[in-house]
Image (cartoon, grey):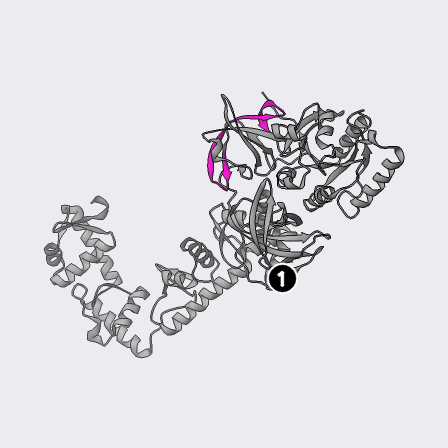
Amino acid sequence: MTTQPHTFVIGTAGHVDHGKSTLVRALTGIDPDRLREEKEREMTIDLGFAWLALPSGRQVSIIDVPGHERFIKNMLAGVGGIDAALLIVAADEGPMPQTGEHLAILDLLRIPRGLVALTKTDLVDAEWRDLVIEETREKLQGTMLAEAPILPVSSVTREGLDALLAAIDAMLDAIPPHSETSKPRLPIDRVFTVAGFGTVVTGTLTGGPLEIGEEVEIQPAGLRSRIRGLQSHRSKVARARPGSRTAVNLSGLAVEDLARGQVLTTPGWLVPTRLLDAQIRLVPDSPVALEQNDEVDVFIGAAEFPARVTLLNAERLDPGQEEWVQLRFPEPAAAVKGDRFIIRRPSPSLTIGGGVVVDPHPHRHRRFRPEVVRALETLASGTPEEIILQALGREPVEVRQLLKRVTIPEVDARAALTELIAADEVIAPRRSIPAANDYVIAAAGWNQVTGQIQAMLAAYHAKNPLRRGMAKEEVRSRTGLPARAFEEIASHAADLGLLAYEGDTLRLPEHRITFTPEQQRAIDRYVAALRSSPYAPPSPAEFGIQPEVAIALADTGAVVRVGEGVIFARDTFADIERQVLEVIDRQGSITLAQFRDHFGSSRKYAQAVLEYLDQHRVTRRIGDERVRYAHA
């Protein structure tokens, strides 16, 4: 068992009975018509598959698609993942209706390379052949295949086959090997069972490799399985590479669980969606326009989905025009940014256009909003940095959620995020290189949130000058931020001196509790009385001190408020705490009566002090006794 070499996938296209399957059989020695009905009709109905080694040694898979208009849906299931196209035109007929539709589909899917094989040349003379070549060249104008070579061949006499193989080799020289840095995706185009092995799915692998033993997920069904075996070109491989036709033997799933159009991939990243933002284009010769809320069939990967179209910036899309749209699906679909698709009218069934996915997980948009169009333009053609800033908006976002939201390769997104943090365009409150569960926020959002908090605290201080600060949870609640996001932002803002923590409250750094002259005189008299009677302190009310002033005095740290109306000078209370612990250390515990007798105080004061020490985990009550908290 080996690792699969780099391979390429070529898809045939062309009108029914123009010799696609016959040419594939002549090139490869493999009959792509695998169904009995296909052989009886002498017509390809579903996808067929073959392969060959080119003169250079390069491995090529060939997907043979049906040409008849009734089976165009099967054709669409096969062309989504191809590297190049082989357009077939019969020399005895020339371009026909399905030639044009297949050519439009290849153009809409932006298939980057292609050749034209002029088949059945043994049935025509040279003059007729040259006329058909000229007609075909005209048909190609304005498409991706406008400059494609047109090569005359005969599958019967084998004339021109060597030249065709050499041309395919030369064409593939210009196509780089598939990248293996993304997540693997295998749009499933066949599902079957093999005796002794179980369920097998096939498709064209893109994005990244698959390996035997790897856990995989089937979307949008959400099924999990493990790869039991891999094959390509009927050879077992331990590792399948992107760009190859791949058969995957799955464990734990029945054929009935699976269907064409599902996607096999790595678990946990491909999230099904019922909404897609996209840019679409109608083909110039579409017989119909596209209007708001029209129903279409969307063909993406190997899947077909009915959808409703929301035209975001127009009431009507005429043939040849482009527009931003939102597609709404009744059932979940599996797609990622950059996926190209075809749209067809359901009835009568015909191809009218195609497009590209810009955002696979959008919010529902209101129409005719310039900001929506600007956002889509950024997603479609902006830099990674621009896309990240747009995705962040003004809200804090976890890094792992941001990476999912931006729908660009993770390595590019992380590099762009690092650049933005270094340039202070994005703030990472917790650390300069944020972890996956850390929050980040755009600089504009940071300024807005911290400004909101500062304004909130300033208003609170003005209204409550005798309070040390605003309860942290109340501040968070008013910002509407998640608890952890708020904590990271507030902590970083405190580190920068924008605000200050006071226990479970927040304040502006410059805020200080300030008493009126009259209040200060009463406080001075009261504190002096506390020192004169340390263990039987007077109540603040005896000195005309209101409860809110007493609380504020405790907040300054000058006194300790242990209960309603029970206040001690700070140094006195520190001495009380020290003596209580000395008694506990000496005799193992202290009771309320022992406290009262030791300090010569009333039961009221003894109970208030001991309960305060319990609350602050200095002591712990066991029955009628108090012990050190740490020894409890």
Identify the residue at horizontal 21%, vertical 66% (top origin).
Answer: 564
Q: Does 625 appear above or below 76?
A: below
Q: Is residue 357 magenta?
A: no
Identify the residue at horizontal 11%, vertical 54% (top origin).
Answer: 594
- How many residues crowd mark 1 within 10 Å: few (<14), some (14–19), many (20+)? some
> In the figure, is residue 248 to the left or right of 158?
left
Percent position of residue 59, x then y: 69, 27
Q: Residue furthest bottom?
A: 518
Q: Amino acid at mark 1?
A: Asn
> In the figure, is residue 593 to the left or right of 283?
left
Percent position of residue 418, x then y: 58, 48
Q: Which residues are magenta?
A: 216-240
How many marks the image carries: the answer is 1
Identify the residue at horizontal 69%, vertical 58% (top origin).
Answer: 318
Q: Nearer the viewer, residue 36 or 600?
A: 36
Q: Nearer the viewer, residue 44 or 136?
A: 44
Residue that badge 1 annotates: 313
Inspect this view and state whether residue 53 appears: no
Q: Nearer the viewer, residue 596 or 137?
A: 137
Identify the secondary structure beneath mark 1.
Answer: loop
